[in-house]
Image (cartoon, rainbow, N blue to C red):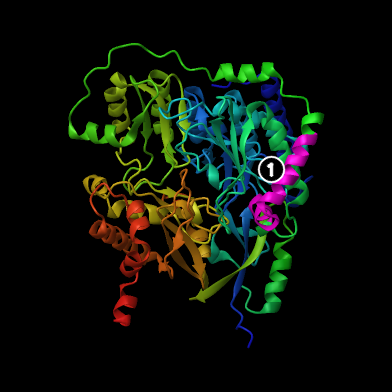
Amino acid sequence: MYSYSNFDADFVRSRVEEFKGQVARRLDGSLTEDEFKPLRLMNGLYLQLHAYMLRVAIPYGTLNGAQMHQLAYIADTWDKGYGHFTTRQNIQFNWPKLQDVPAILDALADVSMHAIQTSGNCIRNVTADHFAGAAADEIEDPRPTAELIRQWSTDHPEFAYLPRKFKVAVTGAPHDRAVTKAHDIGLRMVRNDAGEPGYEVVIGGGLGRTPMVGKVVRDFLPRADLLAYLEAILQVYNLSGRRDNKYKARIKILVHETGLEELKAKIEAVFARNQTLLEPVDAGIVARIAADFAEPTWVRKPVVDLPTDVGFRAWFDTNTAAHKNPDYAIVTVSTKAIGATPGDVTSAQMRVLADLGEQYSHDELRISHEQNVILPHVHKSDLPAVYASLKAAGLGTSNIGLISDIIACPGMDYCALATARSIPVAQEISNAFEDLAVQHDIGELKIKISGCINACGHHHVGHIGILGLDKAGVESYQITLGGDGTETTTIGERAGPGFAYDEIVPAVERLVEAYLGLREDETETFLAAYRRVGMAPFKSALYPEVVANAA
Amino acid sequence: MARAFEPQVATANHLLDGDVVYFTEHGDWTRHLTEAVVAETPDQAETLLGAASLFPQDVVGVYLANVQVIDGKPEPSHFREIFRTRGPSNYHHGKQAEA
C-alpha cells in the first residue's frame, strides 16, 4: 500500500491547520457563509438535510486495518457510531458538528487520510477496480497509476476551478469492475502488439442528467506519456468546457457538442506541446510508488478442504472471487444484510473488518463502488474463520451480485439535493426478497437506486435502475431496464411512467416474476433475458392495466 | 390565475450542528416547527424572510417553506419538509430521536 512521504504528511497536516483557522473565523464571524462554503467544500464538508456531512477520501478504495480502525474511532467519537460507504469508494459521516471537524481531520491525518477534493469542481478522488492487485483476470495492478494521478491532481493549481467536477477511474483488468466508461476519463491498462504497457483512454462518460457512455480517444497511450496526456485533456476541457450552464459543463457535453474527432485533434495538439514543455515524471517517484504496491509475500500453506455446510458454501460461491494466486480468494463482504442500509457499517463492524484485514488479508481492505468491503487476499484455508467472524458481526450475508446487493445513494433521508428517498426503497426490496434461496434462484441482478437525477446511485447502469423524483409534491420512481456498468456499458432504457412510493416494490416484484417466467433456463440472467426479449414483456408486467385497457 | 398564497415559515440549518431550525415570533430560532411564526400573506412572508436573514452567525441557508396551519399549528406541506421535521427514515436519529 502507498505510504505517505514527508511531503504528503506535511501537506495534509498543513491543510488541517488551515481549515482549523477557517472554521474558527467562521465561528467568530470573520467569515460569512458565502465565504466559508467553498472552503469547507474543498475539505469535503457539506451541509445536508439534517446535519453536516463529511466525505472522506479513500484513494482508489484501498485502506489498511489501522485506517479502518480510525474510521471506527471517528464514528464513535464525533458521529453516531457508523459510516456510509459511497459509490465512489469513499466514506461519509452523516452527523459531524462544525466545531469538531478540524479534530476529525487531524484524526484522519494521523492515519494518512483526508477529505481534500471530495467536493467541488476539481479532480475528485480517483477510483479503481476494487479487486486491484488480486484479481485472477488482471493484466496489471491499476493502483500505481491511480496513485500517480492522485499525486498529480491533488492541489493541482491549474485544475482547481474546472467548469465542473472531474472523475477518473482506472482498471487493470479486461472485466471492468470500475465503471470506467461512465467517468470523465476512464483508463484501461492494455499492452500493445509489442507487449509494451500502456492505456486505452476513454473520455466523456458519465451518468447524471445526460447519461453517456465514454468514447475511446486513444487506443494506446504509452505509459510514460500518461500525465502529459491527462494534462492535455484537462487543459482542453478547462478552456473549452462550458461554464455558462452547470448542466452542460461536464466534459461529456464538450465531447458531444464538439465531436470526438475534433476534440481529439485539439487534445493531441496540446499533448504534443506538453511533451516538449513538461518534464517527464521522475522515474524514482514512479519506482517508489510501484514498490509500495508490490505483491504481498504470499503465505505458503496447504489448502485444507473447505466446509460443506450449506451456509458456508452459499457464501463461498457468492461472495468470493478468483484470486491470481490459486491458494487465495478475494472475499467481498456484503454491507447489505436483509433490510439494511446499503453501504452502512457500524463502528463495531469496522473493527471486525479491520482485524480481519490485518489478520487474514495482508493488512488490506477495499471499498467497492457497489458499497461493499473487500478482503482482497485471503488464503483459502482461512476462509472458514473469516466467514465465522463476519457472520457473527452481521456481515455474512451471501448476496453479492444478487437482487438484495443494491446500490442506493443516501437520497432524501440525508442529501440536500435529493428529490426522493432511496434507502427505504432499497430496504423494502431487500425485505421483499428476504429468502436467500429465492435470490440465488433469481441469480445475478443489479438494482441501482438514485434519489435524484445526479445519479450517485448509478441507476442508469443498473439491470433494473430506479430514479426517485419529486412529481408535483409526491415521491415518484422511474424504472429503467437493461443498464450495464461493465466493459459492455449500456445506459438503461426508461420503461414508462413512474410509480408512487408504495407502488415501486410491487413493480420490481412484477419485473422479477416476468423474468422468471420468460428466461430460457436458470443460466440466463435478467440482463441477458432483457437483451434477448427487449422491453415489451417487462413493460406488460409493469403496466398490466395498460395492457388490459388495450385489449 | 395566480396561485393562492400558502402560509409560510422561515427555516434554515443551525450553523454548529446543521439541525433544522425555524424562526419564531420572538425573533429567535427554534428546533420545533410548532413554535415557528407563520406568515399568512405575501407581505408578511417578505418581512419574515428579511427578519430571519439577519442571523448569518447562527444559521445557514434561510428560506421560506410552505405549511398548512392545522389547529393553529404549522405543519409541513411538502414531503421534504416533513422529513426535515423528523430525520432520516432508516434510523431513529435526528429530531425524531430528540422529541
Compared across the picture, whether A59 is left or right of A536 comes to: right
**A142 or A84, which is in the foreground?**
A142
Give percent across and percent down for residue A240: 76, 51
Asked if the stretch drawn in magenta spans residue A334, the answer is no
Q: Badge 1: few (under 14), some or many (20 or more) residues near its Cα, within 10 Å?
A: many
Compared across the picture, whether A492 is left or right of A223 comes to: left
Residue A59 falls in image quadrant? top right
Compared across the picture, whether A312 is left or right of A157 comes to: left
Question: The numbered mark 1 sits on a residue in which chain?
Answer: A
Q: Main secondary structure of the magenta part?
A: helix
Q: SS class of the residue under badge 1?
A: loop
Residue A314 falls in image quadrant? top left
Give percent across and percent down for residue A290: 58, 19
Q: Name which residue lies at 29% across and 23% down.
A: A385
**The residue positioned farthest toward the front in the image shown:** A193
Asked if the stretch drawn in magenta spans residue A272, the answer is yes
Residue A127 falls in image quadrant? top right
Observer able to see residue A501: yes
**A292 or A349, which is in the foreground?**
A292
- Above or below for A263 versus B86: above
**A485 or A112, which is in the foreground?**
A485
**The residue positioned farthest toward the bottom in the image shown:** B1
Look at label 1 and name its amino acid.
Cys
Give percent across and percent down for residue A86: 50, 42
Q: Name which residue lies at 77% across and 35% down.
A: A272
- Above or below for B76 versus A125: below
| Range of residues picked out in magenta | A249-273
Q: Name which residue lies at 43% across and 48% down.
A: A407
**A530 or A469, which is in the foreground?**
A530
**The residue positioned farthest toward the top in the image shown:** A300
Q: Which residue is mark 1?
A: A122
- Give the position of the C terminus of chain A as an image quadrant: bottom left
